[in-house]
Structure formats: C-alpha cells, structure tokens
Image (cartoon, grey):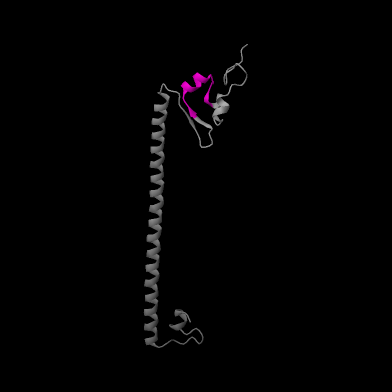
C-alpha cells in the first residue's frame, strides 16, 4: 500500500482518518520529501561534475592539439632547413615525407608524385638510362 493510501482521507469511504494517523502520514510524507530532495541534490551534483569533466576534457584536447601543431611546425622548419637528404617512411615502407633536397637530387618535381609510394618504386629507374621521375628527353 502506498503512503498516500495509508493516511489522510480514506479513498474508499471518504471518512477522515484519526488525527494520530494523520501525524504519522505527514511525518512519512516529510521523510519521503527529504529523501527525494537529497536524491535530486545528489543528481544535480553528479550532473555538475559530469559537465565540468566534459569541459575539462575539451580544454585538455584543445591544449594537446595546439601543442602538437606547434611541435609539427618546429619539426617542419627543422627538416626543411636541413641541407641533408631526409625522407620518412611509414610502417609499410611508403614515403610519408621528404625534403626538397631529396626531391632535387632524385629529379622528382614535387612530393605529391611520390607520397604513399614504396621507396624502391621511387628510386627505381623507369627506363634504362633514365633515373626515377626524370622527364623524358625531347
């Protein structure tokens, strides 16, 4: 039987319950109200923590992205300023990066022509007597 059915007006015959029963019913309602208020307060706190956690993660992600961008710019400046032949391969052995010095020495017009190709394919002469990516003689 619910708290509402236990006290107050008797729903079946419309008679009022005894005053001592009303006091117990009111105390039970007050107790239920306090419990509900505590639960609401707890849920509000949880929601506030989750919101703060989400905002913190977003801020941390933005900081990480900015730092990664800064490091990539520094690496690019360092690599491009180098007089050495530098090329980077991915785990599969495909060209992921190379300096302009590498492109000039191999006669390749631009990085887009070799990006993602296996290094042996890049360095292999295409025709006898011709180096990789060398334009045909006219």
Which residue shows up at 51% across the image and 37% down it?
A: 91
Report the side of 39 relative to 89 (left or right). left
x%, y% of residue 16? 44, 86
x%, y% of residue 34? 37, 72
Report the side of 138 relative to 61 (left or right). right
Which of these two is toward me, 119 or 32?
Answer: 119
Which residue shows up at 39% across the image and 84% down it?
A: 22
Q: Is residue 60 above or below residue 75?
A: below
Q: Is residue 106 above or below residue 119?
A: above
Residue 113 shows in the view: no
x%, y% of residue 99? 46, 25
Q: Is residue 47 above or below residue 128?
A: below
Which of these two is toward me, 37 or 80?
Answer: 80
Question: Which quadrant of the view contains residue 35?
Answer: bottom left
Most extreme residue toward the top is 138
Quadrant that contains the C terminus:
top right
Magenta segment boundaries in residue numbering: 97-111
Which residue shows up at 47% across the image and 85% down it?
A: 10
Residue 10 shows in the view: yes
Which of these two is toward me, 63 or 31?
Answer: 63
Which residue shows up at 37% across the image and 76% down it?
A: 31
Which of these two is toward me, 62 or 125?
Answer: 125
Q: How many marks?
A: 0
x%, y% of residue 121? 58, 27
Q: Is residue 6 magenta?
A: no
Report the side of 118 relative to 56 (left or right). right
């Amino acid at each position: 039987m619910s708290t509402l059915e236990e006290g107050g007006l008797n729903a079946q015959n419309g008679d009022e319950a005894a005053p001592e029963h009303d006091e117990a019913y009111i105390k039970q309602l007050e107790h239920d109200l306090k419990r509900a208020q505590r639960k609401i307060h707890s849920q509000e706190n949880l929601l506030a923590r989750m919101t703060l956690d989400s905002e913190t993660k977003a801020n941390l992600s933005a900081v990480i992205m900015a730092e990664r961008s800064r490091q990539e710019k520094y690496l690019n400046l360092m690599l491009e300023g180098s007089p050495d032949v530098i090329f980077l391969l991915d785990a599969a052995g495909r060209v992921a990066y190379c300096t302009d010095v590498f492109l000039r020495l191999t006669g390749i017009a631009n990085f887009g022509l070799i990006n993602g190709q296996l290094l042996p394919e890049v360095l292999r002469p295409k025709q006898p007597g011709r180096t990789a990516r060398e334009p045909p003689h006219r």
